[in-house]
Amino acid sequence: MSKGSFLNGDRMDLEHQISVDFGPNAPKFICWMAPIESLDITQVQLANVDEVAKFVTKKRTDEHLSSRLLLDIALTKWGIDTSLLEVRRNEHRAPSIAYLPGTWVRESLPSISIGHSNGWAFVGLIESGWTIGIDGEPNDLSISEGVFDMMAKGEELALLKSGQINPIILWTGKEAVQKAARLGMHLNPREIEIPIEGVQDNISIGNLNFQLRNLKFNGYNISVAIGRGNGYDAIPEDELLRQTKAAMNDNPDWSIGCKTTRSNA
């Protein structure tokens, strides 16, 4: 598949959509991948200006901007006006989307997952009430045995060292679950056990439960994990706005002015 450009008129053609099967009762979700490009921050309205300013390499800047542009395109495909949105991060650096401060709209928004590897960006969206994690690595990625002890323990580690488990599937699968749990590396990958079959799995960690799918696409091993949960990071203004709207509903003559601002613009 040619990388091409996703800044052209078609921007998101079907060749970049990742088909994942979670069965007939699955929630609404979409997954996309697109090439990382050299972009200007003015082209990417969901970029975080403060975050970009801290990057020390152009590669990291391009990864951030390309993945945020892909997120913008995917959200538009979902049917959302992204001019009203910003990207937040929780205490574990897991991303979520939210309406800009001062925006009266408070419709349910999908949970998100973002990733990038070897020149490609990945984005997953899933309906409210669920969380999603997506991760991808090239099929020919070489993973040093020196990191196996960081990835697994016990029987899983023994199977990994004996070559009975594909380390790439283990790597991307655990990353996808970490993202779906919205905990990142605060969820120790050694505590996530991926069944040896590794194609369609149900993963339980404490009271957390996830469905995991692994597939080959465009030269990559891609893992997608989904589970029930809250993918929205609330701020104090959310409760204030809820109370204000309730007061307005109780008293139609009551009104207030507000200003919509993008905090990191």
Image (cartoon, rainbow, N blue to C red):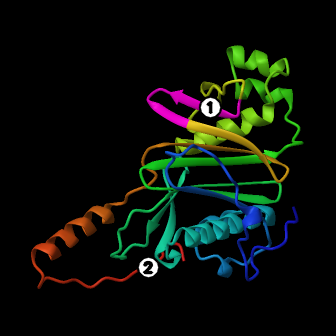
Which of 195/23 is in front? 23
- Name the kind of residue labelled 1 in the image: Asp
Which label was assigned to residue 261? 2
Q: Is residue 70 magenta?
A: no
- Name the kind of residue labelled 2 in the image: Thr
What's the residue at 72%, 24% (across, down)?
196
Q: Is residue 228 left or right of residue 185?
A: left
Which of 1/5 is in front? 1
Which label was assigned to residue 201? 1
- Quarter of the image for the N terminus: give it: bottom right
Which of 162/145 is in front? 162
What's the residue at 26%, 85% (across, down)?
257
Residue at the far front in the pictured view:
24
Q: Is residue 185 left or right of residue 25?
A: right
In the rendered view, tell whether residue 215 sits above or below residue 151: below
Alpha-carbon neighbours of circle 2 within 10 Å: few (<14), some, or many (≥20)?
some
Q: Where is residue 83? Give x, y as percent.
A: 51, 79
Cα–Cα gap, marks 1 and 2: 42 Å
Which of 226/45 is in front? 226
Q: Secondary structure at mark 2?
A: loop
In the rendered view, tell whether residue 57 sits above or below residue 210: below
Query: Can residue 47 be seen?
Result: no
Which label was assigned to residue 155? none
Kindly indicate whether the residue at mark 2 contacts the one at mark 1 (C-beta within 8 angstroms).
no
Magenta region: 198-210
Q: Is residue 47 left or right of residue 5?
A: left
What's the residue at 13%, 82% (across, down)?
254
Picture quadrant where residue 54 is located:
bottom right
Q: Secondary structure at mark 1?
A: strand
